[in-house]
Amino acid sequence: MKKSIGVSPNIETLFGTRDENVRLLEDGLNITINLRSNAIEIEGAQRDVARAEQVFTDYETLQRSGYSFTNGDLNSMLRVLTSDPNSTLRGLADAGKQRSFGRRTVQPKSSNQRRYLEAIEKHDMVFGIGPAGTGKTYLAVAMAISALLAKRVNRIILARPAVEAGERLGFLPGTLQDKIDPYLRPLYDALYDMLDPEKVDRYLEKNVIEIAPIAFMRGRTLNDSFVILDEAQNTTSEQMKMFVTRLGFNSKAVITGDITQIDLPNARRSGLLEAIDVLKSVNGLAFVHFDESDVVRHHLVQRIVRAYDEHKVRVAEQQMLLLAEPRSGESRIAESRVAESKTADVPVGSQKPVTTTPPELRTGTSAAKE
């Protein structure tokens, strides 16, 4: 099917840098887009052409209403749109308007990120699990700020296990706040990125944003709060159970973690892994899993994550082969032993010694009897 649509003013901004958005639509919707002097030609299946036409119509409507796309938001929306047949450009833009993230506009850059934001809105406890760079922590902080500014909660509580990544820093100087600040730096970065530094400092001073070491949370009930537990893969089983039972009235909790980067000692099982098994059937919870396609950092990060995943699969296959080899050797030995026992006329150890009496003794014995 081929269809031509009229060219509206400033439509070239939809095409993106070096027509990257056009190529994204062509690849995602399996269509061909050609720009003529007075029209845009779209060729492909009827359903795909209709979706592409809807994109151009929504873009024109948003422009007329004064909506502006910034920081690559349009490209992110188009990625979500091409992967989710039920989404529209206008619907994604309207969803972004409903959330206030301080001085920044945050748009989901993949379908999993969109499901993550929707899960946080609909559920009181959400687990975000996936590799590095998928936006788990950043989006959680964004939703916490949105809830705080909308006065749906009274405070934000940030927690993270104090576990180093493969090294020991020893005793850190300063107060308790100074000691745990290095572990919470990614959360601080997201806060300062979305709010003015003065406002963040004021919130921290008044405990509107509270830093709560997970080791000191036992016995607390967190009401009217948005609680974020970052790097949850480094919690122990006891710490995870303690954290998920702190939730009070009118509160939300978001637990994020990457199960491929566990820094706990080998003897301890990750509390996040146990929570996935134990809580998967509990109503009211939501689990959102990310993969390498959701990575929004440098394009190399996505390839690195994929390479590590493939390496992990190869190592697992090699271990399975090594475990299978000794068993096959033992089975061959057992089979050879069974074959030897079947071919032997007399079983080993069952033969009795045969004694023969010399002739002279036999004669003497018979004469004695006579």
Image (cartoon, rainbow, N blue to C red):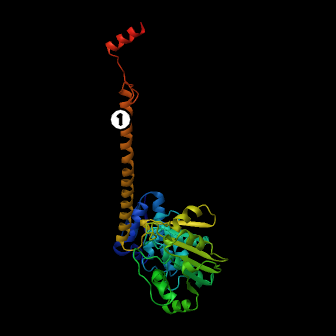
| Total tally of numbered discs in the picture | 1
Q: Nearer the viewer, residue 279 or 319?
A: 319
Of the 4 image quadrants, the one containing the N terminus is bottom left
Picture quadrant of residue 8:
bottom left
Which residue is most to the right? 249
Instruction: Give the x, y percent position of residue 167.
Output: 39, 76
- Please indicate, yes or no, whether residue 37 appears anywhere in the rendered image: no
Q: Secondary structure at mark 1?
A: helix
Instruction: Give the x, y percent position of residue 53.
Output: 47, 66
Task: Name the residue beneath numbered marker 1.
Answer: 336
Q: In the visual, does 42 lie left or right of 253?
A: left
Q: Nearer the viewer, residue 251 or 265?
A: 265
The amino acid marked with disc number 1 is Ser
Image point (58%, 87%), residue name: 208
Picture quadrant of residue 252:
bottom right
Picture quadrant of residue 369:
top left
Image point (36%, 20%), residue name: 355
- Please indicate, yes or no, whether residue 242 appears anywhere in the rendered image: yes
Image point (51%, 87%), residue name: 176
